[in-house]
Amino acid sequence: MPPSPSSPDRPTGSPTGSPGGSPAATGAVTGSTALALRGVTVTFGGVKALTGVDLAVAPGTVHGVIGPNGAGKTTLFNVACGFVVPDEGTIERRGERLTRLRPHDLAGLGTARTLQGLGLFDRVTVLENVLVGADRHARSGFLTALLGLPRAAREDRALRERAMAVLDRLGIASYAARYPGSLPYPVRKRVALARALAAEPDLLLLDEPASGLGADDMTELGDLVQSLAAEQGVSVLLVEHHMDLVMRVCDEITVLDFGRRIASGTPAQVRDDPAVLAAYLGEQVG
Amino acid sequence: MAALRTRASAWWAGSILGRHLLVALLGLVVVVVVLESSSDFRNLQLASMAYLGIAAGGLTVLTGLNGQISLGHGALMAIGAYTTALLLDDREASTPLPLVVLAAVVVTLLVGIAVGAAAARLHGPYLAGATLALAVAVPGIALYFKEQLGGEQGLRVVLPDIPAWVLDLAYFVTGQDLTRSRYVAYLAWLTLVITFVLLANLARSRVGRRWRAVRDDEVAAELAGVHLGRARVSAFVVSAAAAGAAGAMMALTVRLAAPSGFTLTLSLTLLSAVVLGGLGSLAGALLGAALLTFLPQVVTDIGVDAGLSDIRAAELAPLVYGVVMVLVILLAPAGIVGTVRTALLKRRLRRSAAAQTRTAGTNPTAPGTPGTPTTDPATTTSKGSTT
C-alpha cells in the first residue's frame, strides 16, 4: 500500500524546526539533532542502570538501540520520556535542553511513544484509542466541550478524519468500531502504533514494536518505519530484539551492555565491532 | 425521501449538541405529561427522583468515565442544600431562584476543587477513604456551628412564591393551576435535563475522551499528552457541581437542610444507583434513581396486597433492593443499561459480520484475511460507513 501523501496536514513544525520546506527536507536542512542524550546516568538504589550514556538521533533517521536483556534500553526510553529523571546528564530536543520533562509534555513537543505492553484503552473503541493520540491537534477548551459548541463538533470531525486516515494507512480501518480486547495481538499492536502516529510526531519512540509479530507483519512494519523516516522526516528511536529488522531499517545503532554504551555506528560497523560480538551477538552473526 | 433520510442521519451523527438537545426536548415533553397527570404526592416523589438522578449522573461521570470512586457525594449534596437554605431563609429572601441554584453549584464546585486536588493523588481504596471522611465530616460541621447552621434541627428552606409569569405560562400550556409541589417538580426536572445535557456534551467531547483514557491506562494517557492531575480534578469538580445542583433541588423539595438527610447512607445509595443502572451511563443513573425512589413503595404495596402487616411490608423494601443489587452484580455486572447496550452492540457486530461474509462470498478473489491492507473488502465497506 502506498504511503498516503499526508504532508499537507502535517503539523506546521515547531518554532525551532526548519523554516518551510517539505517534511522530507527537514532532516537535510536542520543541523541539530532530533533527540540527544548526553552523559545520562541513572541509578536505582545501588544499581547503576545507565552510566554516562550518549545518544543522538539525527532528524529523519532511524536509530536503533540494542543490547542484551537488562542492558538499560527501556530505562533509556523512560529517561527520554520523563518517566525517569536521570541523576546526571541532559536531554536535548532539537538542540534545546529539556529540564523538568514530564511525560504529558511529550505530545506537545512532537514526541510519541509506543509501550512494550501496548497500554491500549480497553473500554473504548479502536477509533477512540487513536483519537486520544490525535488529541494534541485539538485546541478547543473545557467550556466549548461543556456547551457542545459547533466548534467542538467541527474539531472532533477533523480529529476523526485524521484518525481514520491513520487506521487506513495501517490497514486496520475495518476494526475502527471494535474494542481492542476482542482483537488479535498483531492488530492490537497496530492500534498502538496508530495511536502514536495519529499525533503526527516528528520523533517516534518504538519500544519493541515487532515483538509477537509474524514475519509478514514484521516486514510491513519495517517498510512503514523506513517510509516514515525517509518520506515524512520522522526521526525514529527503536528498541528491538529482532536483529534482522534492526539491521534492515536502522541508519544508526547504539549498543548498550550493563548500562554502558559499548558501540555505535552504522549497522555494518556495529555488526563487525568485536565488543558487540563479544557482548551480544556472539558467534551467530560472525 | 431517501436523500432526506441520509441528510437526517448525517446531522444525527454530526451534531452532538443538536442530538442532545433533541433528546432533552423529548424528555421535557415526557416530564410535562407525567407531572401534569400525577398527584401532588407523586410530583414530590418525582422531584426526589430528579435530585437523586442529578447526583447519580454526576457520580456516574466520575466513577464510570474517570474511574474514581467517591463516597462523599452525599456530603457534596449537603453543601449545595445548606447553601440554598442559607439563601432562602425567609419569605423576604430576594435572591431569584436561578441565582440560588447557581450559588449552590458554585459553592459545591469550590469545595470540589479542594477535595478533587487532594483526591487526584489518591487511588482506589485510598480515594474511597478520603471521600468517606468528607461524608462523615460535613454533617458534623452542621452540628458544630449550631447558631449558623441550625444543628440537629437543620435549616428550614422557604420556597419563594411562584413568579406570576410562571403561573400564567403553566395555565396557558396545561390549563391547570400550578401547585407548589408541581412547581418544585418542574424545577428539579428542568435542572436534571440541563445537567444531563451538559454532562452528555462533556462525555462525548475530548474532555470525556481524556477522562476515559486516564481511567483505562494512565501511562498511555500521559504519553498521549493528557495531564493526569488535571483530568482527575476536572472530573471531580464537574461531578461535585452536579451534586451541588442536586443538593439545591433536594433542599427545595424537602424544604429542609438537616444533617440527618445527608448521612453516609445517602452517598452509598447514590453509588448503588449508579452501579445498578450501569457505570458511565446517564440513562443508567436515571434508571437507578427511579429504582431508588419507586422500588420501596411498589414492593411495600405488593407486600400489603399479599397480606403482610404494614411493618412487615415496609421491611420487605430494603430486602428486595438488596436482592436486586446482588442479582444485577451477578448477572449483569455492567449494570442494566450497560448490559442492554452490550447486547445491542453484539447483535450489530454479528449482523455486519454476516453482511461482510456475504460480500466476500460474491467476490471470491478478494483476500479476506484481516490485517491485509487495502484490498480487504471489509476495509472499504467500513470506510464508506464511517466517513
Image (tube, coloured by chain):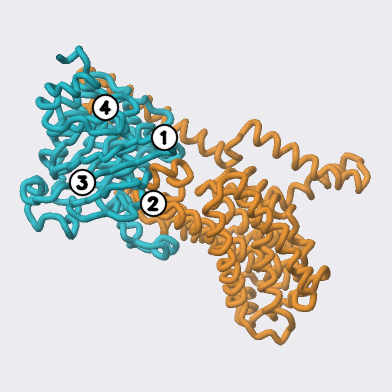
Chain colours: A cyan, B orange
Please report, as a chain letter, where disc 2 is located.
Answer: B
Q: Amino acid at mark 4?
A: Gly
Identified at 36% across, 36% down, the residue is A48
Q: Is residue B5 visible?
A: no
> Between marks 2 and 3, how big is the CA–CA gap?
22 Å
Q: Secondary structure at mark 4?
A: loop
Quadrant where the image shows the C terminus of chain B: top left
In front of the other: B336 or B125: B125
Q: Are marks 2 and 3 in contact (CB under 8 Å)?
A: no
- Judging depth in this view, the residue of A74 and B64 nearest the camera is A74
Residue hosting label 2: B226
Specify whether disc 4 shares its chain with disc 3. yes
The answer to whether marks 1 and 4 sit on the same chain is: yes
Q: Amino acid at mark 1?
A: Tyr
Q: Position of residue B44 (x, y in %)?
A: 73, 63
**Residue pointed to by mark 3:** A35
